[in-house]
Image (spheres, rainbow, N blue to C red):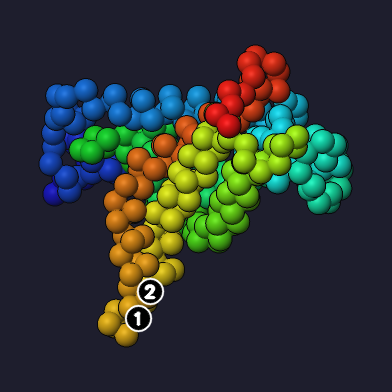
């Protein structure tokens, strides 16, 4: 019986080179450019992380009436610019001098980090776990999400509840963009379109979440006895089929909404007004 120590014998290892697996010398048999997808994913997520980190620590240029950056909304610190000449926000405190965005972004960031699609995206893009279908990861042992720190992914459902509140706040912000301090309701600028589209995409991404689908229709034994929940479950299921696209679209839209406010606040251009 081979022990793995005989001359010429394959050393005992785990993963795809374990003794019970086929002895294929190649690491994988794919001949296409399988690395493009994880590389593009990593580049896209890294670009957003760099941009959002810069904006979160900037603590400036996040408000230009009637627009407030989604990274800073709801702005609760005493020094928030909307407190001075925009909508009335409730003051919670100075937050120890921290940028308000560092506290606000915790909730949507937690929701996206624990999202089923984003797990797949950054597991493949950054950790190569695995980098692509039929391409083994470079580790000999896989423990999944059963140990710290990845076990915290089980908190996704609770972040979903927080994400619903965030989507509600962004919807409120979008409604306020139809109001001008000088002319009242009836204002509509390019920023109004940007914020409205962003709110819609945020809602679509949030409601297409797997947790949402389970909450509205999970654990039901008889759909016929719960027609309303069945209808909601069906709608969530159709949205869920586009969850990956909505994840990227909402990620881009929230960054563009923040960038738009930044450009207005720094005087790069004036908000084009339709009426």
User: To which residue does mark 1 refer?
Assistant: 226
Quarter-of-image position of residue 273: top right
Q: CA distance from mark 1 to mark 2?
A: 5 Å
- Could you say which is closer to the camera, residue 117 or residue 153? 117
- Could you say which is closer to the camera, residue 174 or residue 141? 174
- Could you say which is closer to the camera, residue 34 or residue 104? 104
Report the side of 207 relative to 163 (left or right). left
Q: Which mark is residue 229?
A: 2
Helix, strand or loop for disc 2? helix
x and y percent of residue 132 in the render? 27, 35
Q: Disc 1, disc 2: CB below 8 Å?
A: yes
Q: Which mark is residue 238?
A: none
Report the side of 17 relative to 205 (left or right). left
Residue 178 seen in the current view: yes
Helix, strand or loop for disc 1? loop
Residue found 49% across the figure and 27% down from its top? 46
Q: What is the quadrant of the C terminus in the image? A: top right
x and y percent of residue 237 in the render? 31, 59
Q: What is the residue that sits farthest to the bottom in this orientation?
A: 225
x and y percent of residue 265 in the render? 70, 23
How crowded is the residue under tag 2: few (<14 C-alpha within 10 Å), some, or many (20+)?
Answer: some
């Amino acid at each position: 019986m081979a022990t793995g120590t005989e001359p010429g014998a394959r050393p005992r290892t785990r993963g795809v080179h374990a003794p019970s697996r086929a002895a294929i010398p190649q690491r994988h048999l794919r001949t296409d450019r399988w690395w493009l997808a994880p590389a593009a994913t990593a580049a896209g997520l890294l670009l957003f992380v760099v941009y959002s980190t810069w904006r979160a620590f900037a603590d400036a240029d996040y408000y230009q009436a009637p627009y407030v950056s989604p990274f800073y909304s709801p702005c609760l610190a005493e020094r928030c610019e909307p407190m001075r000449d925009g909508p009335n926000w409730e003051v919670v405190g100075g937050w120890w001098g921290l940028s308000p965005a560092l506290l606000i972004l915790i909730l949507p960031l937690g929701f996206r980090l624990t999202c089923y699609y984003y797990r797949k995206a950054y597991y493949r893009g950054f950790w190569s776990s695995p980098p692509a279908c039929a391409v083994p990861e470079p580790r000999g042992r896989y423990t999944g999400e059963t140990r710290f720190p990845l076990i915290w992914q089980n908190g996704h459902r609770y972040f979903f509840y927080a994400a619903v509140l965030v989507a509600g706040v962004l919807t409120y912000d979008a409604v306020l963009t139809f109001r001008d301090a000088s002319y009242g309701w009836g204002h509509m600028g390019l920023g109004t379109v940007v914020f409205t589209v962003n709110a819609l995409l945020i809602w679509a991404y949030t409601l297409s979440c797997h947790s949402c689908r389970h909450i509205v229709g999970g654990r039901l034994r008889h759909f016929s006895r719960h027609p309303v929940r069945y209808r909601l479950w069906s709608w969530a299921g159709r949205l869920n089929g586009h969850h990956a696209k909505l994840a990227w679209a909402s990620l881009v839209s929230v960054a563009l909404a923040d960038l738009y406010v930044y450009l207005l606040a720094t005087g790069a251009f004036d908000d084009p007004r339709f009426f």
